[in-house]
Image (tube, helix red, strand yellow):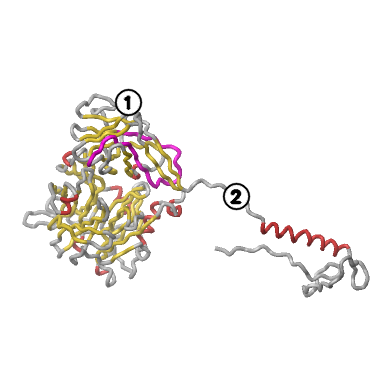
Amino acid sequence: MMSNSRPKGARQEPEKVAGNVGLRPDGTLRPDGAPRPVEPRSAGADVTSADGRRPSWRLLALAVALAVAVPLTWWAVTRPSGPPPSRAPAVTSIPFSPVGDAYVSSARPAVNTGNSPVLRTASRPKILSYLTFSLAGLSGTVTSAKLRFWSNVADLRGAAVHAVDRSWNENSITDATAPALGETVAQTGMVSAKAWVTVDVTPLVLGNGVVRVALTQVGSGSGQYDSREGAHPPVLVVRTSSRVLSGRPPAAVLSGAIDNVPKATGHRYAARDDHGRSMDTLKIIPRPGGGYLGVYHSGPQGAFRVYLAGSRDLLHWTSKAQLDNDASQPTIAALADSGYLLADEASANQAAGLRPRLRFRHYASLAALLAGRADRTFEAPHTLAPLGAGEEGTPNIISAVLSPDLSHSRIAVGFHYSLPLGLDRPGLGVLTNFSSWSARPDTALDAALRADGVSGKIGDRDAVRFLGASFELIEAQAGTGPAWHIYLYDERTRRAVPLHIRTNQGSRSFGNPTVTDLRGPSGAMALVFTLFLRQSLAPSGEAGELIYYRTYSVNH
């Protein structure tokens, strides 16, 4: 959606046996159920009836039965219970050692180091390390995966961890035969000498199977770590739970968190920064060292500007810098080189004959980002929409892989495009080496939405990996009406389902969804969402940018 146009049951007690039931002399129950009076007598007196006869055998039998039954009943109720049946632990952590590791060097492209006791990373010459783990015996849902390795030397900038798709052999891998790197999953930050380094690689671990990773140097410098032949071998610690989030699957947890705004841990309607500017299409990410960063657009129709702000609580924001002019729909991602990538939708420029298009800006560091100082910019030419007509915009960054820098990179992006007389459609693009652009229609997402009855426009979206599964939130119009709705797309099943979002006062249109899985202000894990609520379909006080988050735990 182009924001230019808007922007159980109670416990049953056991029955007690009466000590004095209403019986006739022959042992049958009295009609009125009244108890028979007990007459006092001296010890050793003969037991006879009032008329001098001895009681019948039936009465004696009943007395004996009661004498036995009452103690047995009391014992059955009060006896201690046995130990509860054994259960499998709800949360389990299993360590895995690598089944292969090696480093490769551009200075020695034909040399294999599979038997080396160390793994290395360096920027010049380019040196990187590969590790493979074989996971078996996991059950339940993977809730975390931590890669730990021993650092022999200090490194100010540390290493980045990448996914690796293709297999390789420890005894034959060289720089010339090494597989290509996948997306950056995590960074270590500064590492100390003679210490363990731990990084979160949960997105790479779905369950049993093979996990391949690579370590690369961040910025200039070098690192050295023990290999599986060293004194402190690497280890991948995988944590699983059999009762993750009340046993619900990730898709149900995610949809439940986004659907109910009043039950959010925290929320804010009509969000504005400390300058009073609206924060339309806000995208939030964690800030190194604590707190949060957010990018958004604001300004009059046709003259939007992109801003950066910071927050400590996710709801209140302080403006930091202006990042772009005549642009909207921004999104942001942290990169493996400690830099940042901004993507937005550049506005139409009639004088230059340009229609809305995708623009990318690179910031070399956090300091550069906070100063609004980009060092490189790229504008993607129209590929799916004809030049000078139609539109391409509303980007979301799917992945950004640096090998090892921006000039050797692959950035995957989702976006929407529209033909001059057609509806908005979803697209996928790749920016290679920050200099070459290619794109194609996202037919899988398009088909999933159509299968669920979407016949109108398909616009902005955002992606998240949550509890080992990949999802996208997409805005779309079910028909030709003005309302926009949010759909949840499961990349594994390739199905899209509508969400039923409820606000405090009943807004009826939701657009520009974003989602980030991060640590909330309390330190607990949280899902933070932002949505744009169209003024014409929102009650007073709710229109504009909505921010809300919901904390969660994998152990309840």
Q: Which residues are magenta?
A: 130-156
For residue 26, which quarter of the picture? bottom right
- Going by the numbered disc 1, the residue's amino acid type is Asn
Q: Label 1 near label 2: C-beta < 8 Å?
A: no
User: Is residue 141 a member of the stretch shown in magenta?
Assistant: yes
The residue shown at (43%, 37%) is: 136
In this image, 52 relative to 272: left or right?
Answer: right
Residue 115's tag is 1
Q: Where in the figure is residue 129, as x and y percent of width and height?
A: 28, 33
In this image, 451 relative to 376: left or right?
Answer: right
Q: Where in the figure is residue 347, as x and y percent of width and height?
A: 14, 57
For residue 534, which quarter of the picture? bottom left
The residue shown at (13%, 50%) is: 374
Q: CA distance from mark 2 to mark 1?
A: 52 Å
Residue 83's tag is 2
Please say whether residue 440 is visible from this viewpoint: no
> Which of the marked residues, 2 or 1, is nearer the chain's N terminus?
2
Numbered label tally: 2
Which image quarter holds the N terminus? bottom left
For residue 553, which quarter of the picture? bottom left
Q: Where in the figure is residue 285, as x and y percent of width and height?
A: 26, 53
Helix, strand or loop status at disc 1: loop
Please say whether residue 256 is visible from this viewpoint: yes
- Going by the numbered disc 2, the residue's amino acid type is Pro
